[in-house]
Image (cartoon, rainbow, N blue to C red):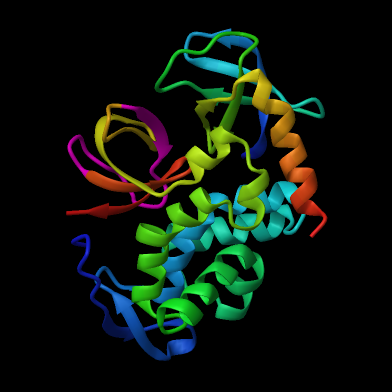
Amino acid sequence: MKRGEPKSVECKCAGGKVCRCVPGGLSVEAYFLKYAFPCAFITLQRGAINQKTYDRLEKAAVRGDSLTRKELEKVFAAADRRMDILVRERGYKKWSFELVQDYYWKWHDRFIKDGEGSYRFAPKVLKELCRVLSGTVVRVRKEAAVIRFKGGKTRPVMTALTGPLKKGDKVIVHYGYAVEKII
Amino acid sequence: MCLAIPGKIVAKKGKSVTVDYGSEKRQANIIDGKYKVGDFVIVQGKIVVDKVPVAQVKKWHGFLKETSKK
């Protein structure tokens, strides 16, 4: 996916319905889940979801499966609330690919900086991990990779959501996961 | 395989560490960065992702407690 050029195509989604997908065959729900899943461990820790639900989310995120919008909105209530703000204030269409991508690539960081919702109480390290950043793979390990960000800081991440990466790949990172390869 | 609270490294053998969460202990691997026994860390999947300064550990618990009420 080329950054800044969100494009969607028609494909088959949950229940065999025709819906809008991103190149690579992901539905907008599956694409959202890839980005949202890395913060599900916070949701699990808070007790808002149980381990069984977490495991199911992980499996779907790794496989690129679609879950229902209703479930995603419930589990990732904060992301849903913030995307609703963008729908109201910025004119995005609910559950459009453009909204999901812009939310994570562009607006997510601003919500963190503004201390929206629970970010107000979040410790600094958590807020930093929470940011959606792009970086370059500098080292590859089993099921993991080390990413270098602009400025030189590095972070180890799991590669379950992207599949194996190679040195030089550019990726988007959220918490301890590489989420998507970019060009 | 992951906990959203900082755990304390209680043992280190090469690149493998044992992280104590009070109620349980977990194993994780270091693939980047320098860590020592006594450090508080965040583990995601099977890897140590970041270090948490002691001053922030308490804040972290407060954050989870505060946001769990909602």
Return the x and y of residue A26 as percentages of the image width and height. 35, 71
Q: What residue do we see at 57% from left, 32% from top?
A: B43
Residue B32: in magenta span: no
Q: What residue do we see at 64% from left, 48% from top?
A: A120
Q: Quadrant of residue B32?
A: top left
Does A12 appear above or below A78? below
Instruction: Say which quadrant the N terminus of chain B sits in.
Output: top right
Predominant SS of the magenta segment: loop
In this rendering, position of residue B56 left or right of residue A144: right
Total number of numbered labels?
Answer: 0
**Which of these two is toward me, A164 or A79?**
A79
Q: In which quarter of the image is residue B13?
A: top right
Q: What stretch is highlighted in magenta?
A: A153-169
Residue A27 visible in the shown view? no
Residue A176 visible in the shown view? yes
Q: Quadrant of residue B52?
A: top right
**Which of these two is toward me, A143 or A10?**
A10
Residue A167: in magenta span: yes
Return the x and y of residue B66 as percentages of the image width and height. 78, 48
Instruction: Say which quadrant the C terminus of chain B sits in.
Output: bottom right
Residue with the most extreme bottom position = A17
Return the x and y of residue A114 as percentages of the image width and height. 53, 53
Does A129 appear above or below A59? above
